[in-house]
């Protein structure tokens, strides 16, 4: 069986992630035979006592074969402790950082890893046993600049290739240690499954590929349901569970959280579907989810903007903008500038604030916001024009009756605000409250 497609890599600068084990050595040899311009990188994680031996083997092999080599070193145990992550995850993150380094520097066109079909089957079994969903079965997710030329090749074909060409390799002694769950799956579980059901490894790998396609479709449908308003990503509560959870995951990603979440986080967000407006749930990295009418909104807490003196101008307001202008503006509140008492300031709401809305009776500002069905998350950030505890305008909602425009008005003013001027992805949010 051919290990790599001869035509896919001929003439390309392919950097092989070379551990020194049989799989990566076989890949390096096969790519060179296919006409690729091969080079290699080696990652010394600082974990194993024998890492120096592996590094020396890789260096000697590359010298003998005339392959340019880059070696990266890190103290992964120290980094894992510092970042409060597991060793395996920390090592994987760092390896991909090394890959991106050689790509960014233009040293290679692509980085090739030696993953094969049995790796996929083992990973599927491992993740299923740990309770993964469809997303977790995408064992070879696409990564920019990274290729896996042997992902459809079984381990037996790799072993046969190594034997046929008499290739040297460094055996990682930890690969035989059955104290590791992955090794027990590799040496005990999967062989037993193959004996009971011939072709099991192929079927598991094919299942993972189908699961990845299904998950991608569901994720794209969920993404369509997201909407952005006032600094938060909104997920409709009526979405069925498979779409709701994926929409929550997408919202977290747009707020900058792409890892370190758990099934419990999604369960907490889903629980809000059954609760009344205002119910909240904490999420990783300081995010929170809150029930707001027909939506569960995910957002990041923001400190209240500092008060500013009430005057015409454009002011930063949190991540958005407050505009007080003598020029008419679509959607802005209109008021009589001279009707505002001297010494008014623009600030966020405070306990004890009272408000007499246009054409209405005096009430607490809290009750006004509740009556208007303005979510508490937004109400806490809305700019109000006030003197003491008397509120004369809730920018984005209503003016007080005492500052309305009359036939005697000399100076008109228009007030508007955008609570969030940007999405996490850098796009402009044009919605105004």
Image (tube, rainbow, N blue to C red):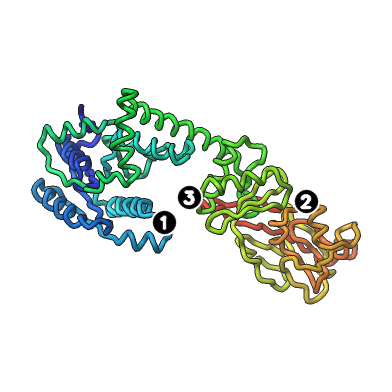
Q: In which quarter of the image is the N terminus?
A: top left
Locate residue 158, reporting x and y percent.
21, 34
Q: Name the residue under label 2.
A: 373
Q: Would you say residue 185 is visible in this rendering? A: yes
Q: How crowded is mark 1: few (under 14 residues within 10 Å), some or many (20 or more)?
A: some
Q: Distance between the residues labelled 2 and 1?
A: 42 Å
Q: Distance between the residues labelled 1 and 3?
A: 14 Å
Circle 3 sits in a helix, a strand or a loop, which is it?
A: loop
In front here: 113 or 429?
113
Circle 2 sits in a helix, a strand or a loop, which is it?
A: loop
Mark 1 and mark 3 lie on one chain; the one further toward the N terminus is: 1
- Does 16 sit left or right of 224 as displayed? left
Image quadrant where residue 44 sits:
bottom left
114 vs 78: above or below: above
Residue ID at (65%, 41%): 236
Tag nearer the camera, 2 or 3: 3
55 vs 146: above or below: below
Q: Name the residue under label 1.
A: 85
Q: Would you say residue 7 is visible in this rendering? A: no
Q: Residue 365 carries which label?
A: none
Q: Residues within 10 Å of mark 2 (few under 14, many from 20)?
A: few
Mark 2 and mark 3 lie on one chain; the one further toward the N terminus is: 3
Q: How far apart are marks 2 and 3 (CA)?
A: 32 Å
Marks 2,1: beta carbons within 8 A: no
């Amino acid at each position: 069986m051919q290990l790599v497609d001869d035509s896919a890599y001929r003439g390309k600068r392919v950097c092989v992630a070379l551990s020194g084990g049989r799989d990566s050595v076989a890949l390096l040899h096969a790519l060179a035979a296919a006409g690729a311009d091969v080079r290699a990188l080696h990652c010394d994680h600082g974990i194993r006592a024998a890492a120096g031996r592996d590094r020396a083997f890789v260096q000697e092999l590359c010298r003998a074969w005339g392959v340019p080599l880059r070696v990266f070193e890190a103290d992964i145990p120290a980094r894992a402790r510092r970042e409060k992550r597991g060793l395996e995850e920390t090592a994987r993150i760092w390896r991909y950082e090394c890959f991106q380094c050689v790509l960014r520097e233009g040293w290679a066109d692509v980085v090739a890893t030696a993953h094969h079909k049995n790796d996929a089957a083992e990973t599927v079994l491992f993740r299923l046993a740990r309770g993964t969903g469809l997303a977790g079965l995408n064992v070879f997710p696409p990564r920019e600049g990274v290729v896996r030329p042997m992902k459809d090749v079984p381990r037996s074909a790799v072993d046969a290739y190594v034997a046929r060409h008499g290739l040297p390799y460094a055996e990682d002694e930890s690969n035989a240690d059955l104290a590791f769950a992955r090794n027990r799956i590799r040496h005990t579980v999967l062989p037993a499954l193959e004996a009971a059901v011939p072709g099991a490894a192929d079927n598991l790998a094919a299942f993972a590929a189908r699961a990845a396609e299904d998950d991608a479709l569901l994720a794209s449908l969920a993404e369509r349901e997201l909407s952005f308003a006032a600094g938060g990503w909104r997920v409709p509560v009526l979405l069925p569970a498979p779409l709701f959870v994926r929409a929550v995951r997408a919202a977290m990603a747009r707020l900058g959280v792409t890892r370190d979440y758990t099934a419990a986080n999604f369960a907490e967000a889903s629980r809000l579907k059954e609760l009344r407006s205002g119910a909240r749930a904490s999420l990783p990295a300081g995010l929170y989810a809150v029930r707001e009418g027909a939506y569960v909104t995910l957002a990041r807490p923001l400190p209240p903007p500092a008060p500013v003196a009430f005057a015409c101008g454009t002011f930063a307001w949190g991540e958005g903008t407050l505009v007080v202008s003598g020029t008419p503006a679509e959607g802005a509140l209109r008021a009589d500038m001279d009707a505002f008492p001297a010494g008014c300031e623009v600030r966020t709401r405070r306990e004890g604030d009272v408000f007499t809305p246009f054409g209405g009776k005096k009430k607490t500002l809290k009750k006004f916001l509740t009556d208007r069905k303005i979510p508490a998350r937004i109400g806490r950030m809305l700019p109000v024009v006030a003197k003491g505890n008397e509120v004369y305008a809730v920018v984005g909602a209503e003016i007080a009756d005492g500052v309305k425009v009359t036939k005697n008005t000399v100076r008109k003013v228009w007030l508007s605000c955008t609570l969030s001027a940007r999405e996490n992805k850098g796009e402009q949010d044009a919605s105004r409250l």
